[in-house]
Amino acid sequence: MKKRVLAIFFVLFMVWTALPFSIIAEEADLSSGTGEEFDNIQELFASILAIGITKQLKQGICKEYVLKRENISVLRGKPDIHETIKNKIQKKQMLFCEYDEMSENNMLNQVLKTTVTILLRQASVSQERRQKLKKLLLYFDTVDLIEPSGIQWNRIRFHRNNQHYKMLMNICYFVLDGLLLSTDKGQYKMATFLDEQQMYRLYEKFVLEYYRYHYPELHVSSSEISWNVDDDVIDFLPKMKTDITLRKREKILIIDTKYYSRTMQKQYDRLTFHSHHLYQIFTYVKNQDIDNTGDVAGLILYAKTGERILPDGEYMMSGNKISIKTLDLNATFSSISEQLDDIVLSYFGNTKKVLKRI
């Protein structure tokens, strides 16, 4: 059965890969609230990667200095005396030299080509998108394929000349590290869905960046809360880091995003909110509101599921408001935007929203 991947997932993914919101809106056509249909998640990644590579080709393929060690007829760079003597003994009139050469065959392009090649092997990717990717691979003819498991992601560095590759590398990392499965024959296949942990990170990042982008009047961050202890002894106490904190003067809203297949728990044949989620948000709020002003509120924001009963509630606990809501991601972007705006309106009142930044 064909699944519809809405514009929201495109947004979630692009936010994770650090693409500016202005480009997201342009590519996903969010103003119309529409989304392209894809048979599966692999189709989506193939489409995104094709867009990104096409943009990069217009700017030019990245070239970097690559160390080469080989036999050559004329001196170049630094000669290796030991290897050159070996050549002499074998009656080869060659010098063995080490030198740097500006080349397209660097780590960035190798990762890109490897990711595209693996996507091409997936039967779930349509012929139309395969053809697009194959045409793009022609520009990487001199670039080597590498083993995905051997990629040292922490060694990839970005600077002024290759910063445009950052988004592409984030996409490749997400595909290769997060979705790649190895078969018994040493081949690779793509997982058919993202696990809850990956989707939770995307979901949290999306909500954070949405508020950061559209509400500059609010101070938006993922902040750390100090324990409100009486004797200043905090040894062995865990760190409290919020998913999202919204501030407007003295008012603070702490948002804890949750992405679970089940948003309610069942205890003794009775549905209840997840107890540890409530304990967590209550602890954050009370340790933030050290003066007991009541200006700090907490919100548990679940991603909506298909369950019959969904979390929804608002409580005053020891002078602070604690709310539980769901965000329907299976909707147009305009609808999702409205839901997020309502959260700001309900707690902070009229707050200026920026629709687009240049």
Image (cartoon, rainbow, N blue to C red):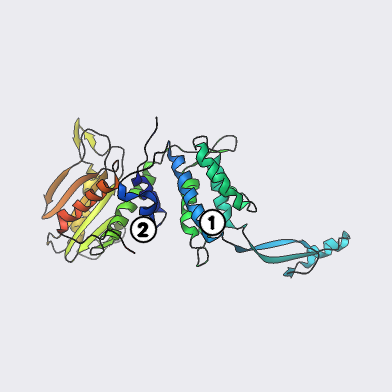
Q: Residue at x 46, y 40 (%)?
A: 43
Disc 2 crowd rating (10 Å Cα; few below 14, some 14-19, many 20+) is few
Q: Which residue is mark 2?
A: 22
Q: Nearer the viewer, residue 108 or 316?
A: 108
How far apart are labels 2 and 1 at the CA level? 20 Å
Disc 1 crowd rating (10 Å Cα; few below 14, some 14-19, many 20+) is few
Q: Which residue is mark 1?
A: 57
Whole-percent x, y for residue 117 in the image:
57, 44
Q: Is residue 165 left or right of residue 258?
A: right
- Sequence-wise, which precedes: disc 2 or disc 1? 2
Mark 1 residue type: Leu
Q: Secondary structure at mark 2?
A: helix
Q: Secondary structure at mark 1?
A: helix
Is 60 rendered above or below residue 334?
Answer: below
Q: Is residue 156 left or right of residue 332?
A: right
Whole-percent x, y for residue 186 in the image:
59, 38
Screen quadrant of the N terminus: top left
Q: Which mark is on residue 330?
A: none
Picture quarter containing residue 4? top left
Picture quarter containing residue 9? top left
Mark 2 residue type: Ser
Does the residue at mark 2 contact the one at mark 1 (Cβ under 8 Å)? no
Q: Residue at x 51, y 53 (%)?
A: 54
Whole-percent x, y for residue 68 in the image:
69, 62
Q: Residue at x 27, y 48 (%)?
A: 334
Whole-percent x, y for residue 87 in the image:
84, 61
Screen quadrant of the C terminus: bottom left
Is 312 rendered above or below residue 266?
Answer: below
Q: Is residue 148 visible?
A: no
